[in-house]
Amino acid sequence: MDHNNDRNVVVPGDLLSDDPKKSGEGTYVKDGKVRSLLYGMASSYKDKVRVIPLAGKYVPAPGDTVIGTVQDIVFSNWIVNINSPYEGLLHISELPRKIEMNEMSKYLRIGSSVMARVKDVDSTMKVELTMNDRRLGILTRGRVAEISPTRVPRLIGKGGSMINMLKKELNCNLFVGQNGRIWVDGNDDDMDLALKTILIIEKEAHTTGLTDRIMDFLRSEKEARS
Amino acid sequence: MIGMEEKLSFFKDGLRLDGRRPDELRPIKIEVGVLARADGSCYIEMGDNKVIAAVYGPREVHPRHLQEVTRAIVRYRYNMASFSVEERKRPGPDRRSYEVSKVSREALEPVILTSYFPRSVVDIFVEVLQADAGTRTAGINAASVALADAGIPMKSLISSCAAGKVDGEIVLDPMKAEDNFGEADVPIAMTPGGDVTLLQMDGRMTGDEFRRALELAKEGCQQIYEVQRRVLVDRYGTIGGPGSCDAAEAEEEI
């Protein structure tokens, strides 16, 4: 079996390696053999084999930045939908300024969108969010797009290559949440193009040479506009 | 001929009523991602069986009291459309569909890594559109592919098929006539590694016949597994995968 193929579609149970030490993300070891846990693309990464899923839900992890919408307000928490099987809890003390309990809905109403960071996740998957950072906050302008969370790494690209190119070419402010929600801010035409581009990236995330192709696409779109 | 009991034969020149060899499966067709709303979906045809499976989740559990603190629960709903059989089937759950749902869930649960998603649920819906014996096995095959399509972590896929006994002979994948008038039916489900997760039997067989039926059904499952795997791999092979990008792009890569 060829283990060196860089981009290989695998299904759960596929043999990836005979060396149990090579077991990376998305794999498991049984009887000394590394096998895939997921339907995805297998690749070598730092002398491990890992499998990147082609589909799946967002599972919150501490440190992730996410975009959520307020679903409910209870006691001193906002319950935030973070596009995941688990809802996020944003406590009033996690906002940059002090807020009274009876003023909660003035600051963040049901339906408001926020940029937040996952502060902690416990073993029962209680997800605590925080907005105590200058880069985080309430989204009052722009639009939010939603893609599969498994495509987020592709949208960002190696060392941010894709996202930086997009920001430059699109003349838009972009923020990618780990949960697959993307905030776009700019003028209407630029935002239209940005959303269109993001959907193309989502659809073609598993293909090679994508960054260059997207760049060509953006250039031709802009030429057509001018 | 004294009685009307003219014995109908299930074999002609060693072949079955539909022309299959005793150890031959019916033709299989699988399609992945047929439903836009579901997280994972699959449509399967095994002979004249037509079954669609949809997977949702992991997602929040409703009603809340069913949720488990340490793992995801798995729900499996097998349902036959009222038009799926010759005589209209009364819609809604009945004794048989409860049973099929239970054994099918238990056939799939051992490979799903439920501990990865505490307090959540994986919902599997299987709808039989056309039935021709072996719908539970078709449902399990479709559900297994739909689970993979939904990105749910699993130790392996599950493949399922039945063996039966007709006219004293052991046959693979009995169709409706053989199932209705045969002597026994043994549906199984297993992993490609050979771990059996479903084993039922309806009818009578000797110990030896049973062992042969089990072996035959296992071989059938291996064949089905190859189809399931190929369908999943080919889905992305057409655009991305190794050696499959179109000519223009291949040049660009060099």
Image: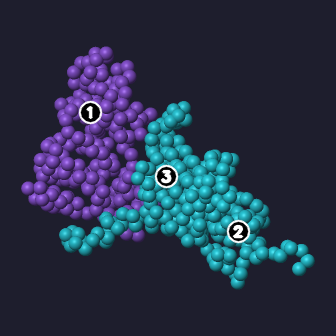
Chain colours: A purple, B cyan
Per the model, the C-alpha gap separating discs 3 and 1 is 32 Å
Q: Amino acid at mark 2?
A: Glu
Q: Is residue B61 left or right of residue B83?
A: left
Is any part of residue B192 visible from this angle? no
Per the model, the C-alpha gap separating discs 2 and 1 is 61 Å
Q: Is residue A64 above or below residue A214?
A: above
Q: Which residue is mark 3?
A: B54
**Mark 1 residue element:** strand
Is any part of residue A197 visible from this angle? yes
| Residue A29 pos. (x, y %) | 45, 55
Q: Chain of mark 2?
A: B
Closer-to-camera residue (A102/A176): A102
Residue B220: name its quadrant: bottom right
Q: Is residue B228 above or below residue B4?
A: above
Query: In this view, which residue lies farthest toward the bottom?
Result: B13
Q: Amino acid at mark 3?
A: Ala
Q: Which residue is mark 2?
A: B178
Q: Is residue B5 left or right of residue A132?
A: right
Rendered residue at 34%/26% (across/down) = A78
Q: Which residue is mark 1?
A: A114
Query: In this view, which residue lies farthest toward the left?
Result: A226
Rendered residue at 41%/53% (across/down) = B36
| Residue A205 pos. (x, y %) | 29, 57
The N terminus of chain A, quarter of image: bottom left
